[in-house]
Amino acid sequence: KQEVTQIPAALSVPEGENLVLNCSFTDSAIYNLQWFRQDPGKGLTSLLLIQSSQREQTSGRLNASLDKSSGRSTLYIAASQPGDSATYLCAAIFSSGSARQLTFGSGTQLTVLP
Amino acid sequence: NAGVTQTPKFQVLKTGQSMTLQCAQDMNHEYMSWYRQDPGMGLRLIHYSVGAGITDQGEVPNGYNVSRSTTEDFPLRLLSAAPSQTSVYFCASSAKRNTEAFFGQGTRLTVV
């Protein structure tokens, strides 16, 4: 079964720290991988999309990398701020899946302490 | 600048009642999908559509129906609500299968 895993489930860091969120997937044959942010009681906000042919994408203080051979993606957040506190979800579209829609990890709940 | 709009935001149903969750997008996207989000289970795909008139089942389709008569709208119907369908429902759309997906704000459904 094609799965996406995010460890740890929760992370707490002091303000200003650089941090890395991890995402692993069981099948290297993916179309793309997308990172989302979800605030409590809210919808998902797209942060970054990495196509299978790309190694990384950057947006402001965020940098996402993709290593298909190892089945891993990371989301790097530079100089974290309390406003970054949220749940971060990664999701992959697997090339061989019947639905070929997003398969989600369970998320990492990030708390940035002032 | 609406994006993906879901209505209602909150709903309480009694067991056995039926209802329709609405989803509309104004980006002329081909792909639309419905997910449910449950604690400890993450987001799971219910149904999806690759264009008007074309729908298919996802991971957890039982108890739900969909149709796609227009590009803009993709309603999700609960035929006979059960407490197990208590969840937060999200609608998403994307231009193509491998392009960026955009999500609505969700519908929080409670079945009592």
Image (spheres, helix red, strand yellow):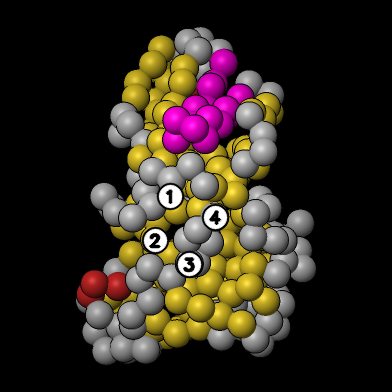
Judging from the image, what secondary structure is the residue with disc 1 in?
strand
Say which residue label 2 marks: B44
Relative to A32, does residue A85 appear above or below in the rendering? above
Question: Are labels 4 and 3 assigned to the same chain?
Answer: yes
| SS class, disc 3 | loop
Q: Which chain carries label 1?
A: A
Give the spatial CA distance, label 4 vs label 3: 9 Å
Q: Mark 1 points at which residue?
A: A104
> Dividing the picture into quarters, in which one does residue B55 lie?
bottom right
Q: Mark 3 points at which residue?
A: A98
Give, as a three-letter code, the residue at label 1: Phe
What residue is shown at x 54% (from left), y 47% (from top)?
A30
Q: Residues within 10 Å of mark 4 (few under 14, many from 20)?
A: some
Q: Is residue A71 magenta?
A: yes
Residue annotated with mark 4: A95
What's the residue type where badge 2 is placed? Arg
Q: Do the residues labelled 4 and 2 touch (CB within 8 Å)?
A: no
Residue A66 or A114: which is nearer the viewer? Answer: A66
- Measured in 3D between alpha carbons, the distance from the residue under mark 2 to the one under mark 3, in whole angstroms, is 14 Å
**Where does the magenta region start and end?**
A62-78
